[in-house]
Amino acid sequence: MRLARPLALLTALLLLAPAAIVRADDTSQRLDDVEKKLDAALAEIERLKLGAAAPETSATRTSHHGFGPGASRIYDRPVGPSIGGYGEVIFTKPDRETEGGAPSGQRPTADLLRAVFYVGHKFTPELLFNSEIEFEHAGVFDAAAATVDPGTGEGEAELTGEATVEFAYLDWQASPALGVRAGKVLVPVGLTNEQHEPPIFFGARRPDVETVLIPSTWSALGAGLYGQTASGFEWRAYWMEGLDARGFSAALPIREGRQEISQPVMTHPGLSGRLDWKGTAGLLVGVSAYTGDSWQEADPAGVSLSARVTLTDVHATWSWRGLQARGLWTTGRLGDAGALSDELGLTGQQRLGERFQGGYVEAGYDVAPLAWPGTRWMIAPYLRAETLDSQESVPGGSEDPALESSVYLFGLAVKPHPNVVVKADREQRSNQADGETSRWNVALGWLF
């Protein structure tokens, strides 16, 4: 009897042990599952604290309201902050001789051309703030490159780098048909000014037409309306600060007239507008324009000066399977070009033209899927041809043949990811004075 009770207890424990072990295993598994879910929840909370600045990096960014993919990411947010950006590094090797055979005097260079950060915040689904902060040439240093005219003693100094706020605006949109935008905005002209992120366009450099004639990147303080329709039309119209004619030149008609300062003069504001049609998948066709008196000072003695700039363009882009193509033609007019040249002290071939014009076409084809079906890489040979004349019909002066030029470009773009690109190309450059220097370029670009 003394051994019967302990033996019965031991037998019961042996019989119940497997069930206890199973229950312990089940409990441990449930604890593991709960721990994994808790870790996932904590990670999601941390992501939300950071503002969900980086949605899935494998996704291709999309454009909204004319902005580039990186600048558009705030529009994909429900509410809260957003961070994005883009950058580009470029290596350039000019030819040793100009097209006329003279020594070019140019040396190979490498440059962190731009490092840009988009910072935005969506207060409500209808109200947001968006901005672009740009550092050029690796930032601003306490140094400058100075040039002085030995004849007059006048000169200018250009900083080695630059830090600017390209745009900063508030946006309110109650419906797709109508929105209100105010602040420092991108002027809605051309193809590159609003969408200037390097993975978007072919070429290591932006087209000359959209830097010399359309002064990309061009932004201004102002306010306006925008919207889109169900039939595929998208439009923008702004009232904004005008150009300053004191910076105009024959070689760069209006580029140095961008005020781009903290307190621009608003004596004569400008108007800009754009209309695009996207009714067919892969196709965009549109027009854009800017107009405004650019003389912001008091009239010279005895002269009524109205240096009105009118800039228009027609443009189109087309994507079909592996093909991407785009083209643009722009024309600019400057009122009172003769009187303005007199006021600025310009003579001979330096005087301003009454007109400037130019255009380009470019196309590339992604051959990677043909060689490697199912690949995520893009490998696209591309071509670009452009022509421009920055000085036509010069009152009281003569045209400079060096300002009538053409560029033929061919290269290769490789994208291991939709938002990362390596581009290498050859620029064959020429002008009517046989003074252009052709060059090789290699560029690295990214956006996020």
Image (spheres, rainbow, N blue to C red):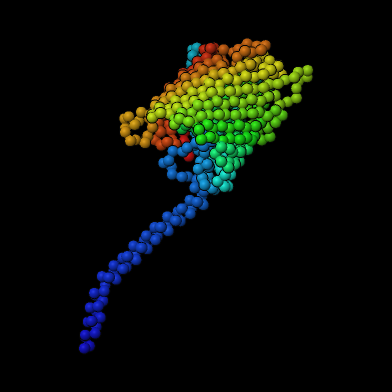
Q: Is residue 357 left or right of residue 279?
A: right
The residue that appears at 23% across and 81% down in the rendered structure is 8
Please identify the residue farthest to the right as the structure is shown. Answer: 302
Residue 335 quadrant: top right
Q: Residue 382: where, in percent of width, then height? A: 42, 24
Left or right placement of residue 369 versus residue 70 in this view:
left
- Dividing the image into 4 quarters, which one contains the N terminus? bottom left
Q: Residue at x 49, y 23 (%)?
A: 327
Q: Residue at x 67, y 22 (%)?
A: 308
Quadrant assignment, res 289: top right
> What x and y, as percent, mark residue 305?
72, 20
**Residue closer to the observer: 179 or 200:** 179
Looking at the image, how many numbered discs can be counted on the residues? Answer: 0
Q: Is residue 237 visible?
A: yes
User: Residue 126 versus residue 397: which sits nearer the camera?
Assistant: 126
Q: Residue at x 55, y 15 (%)?
A: 404
Q: Is residue 298 above or below residue 117?
A: above
Query: On screen, 349 above or below 296?
Result: above
Q: Position of residue 52 (x, y in %)?
A: 49, 47
- In this picture, is 164 found above or below 93? below
* Residue at the extreme bottom: 1
Horizontal side, residue 118 vs residue 440: left or right: right
Locate residue 392, reporting x and y percent. Answer: 60, 14
Residue 84 shows in this picture: no
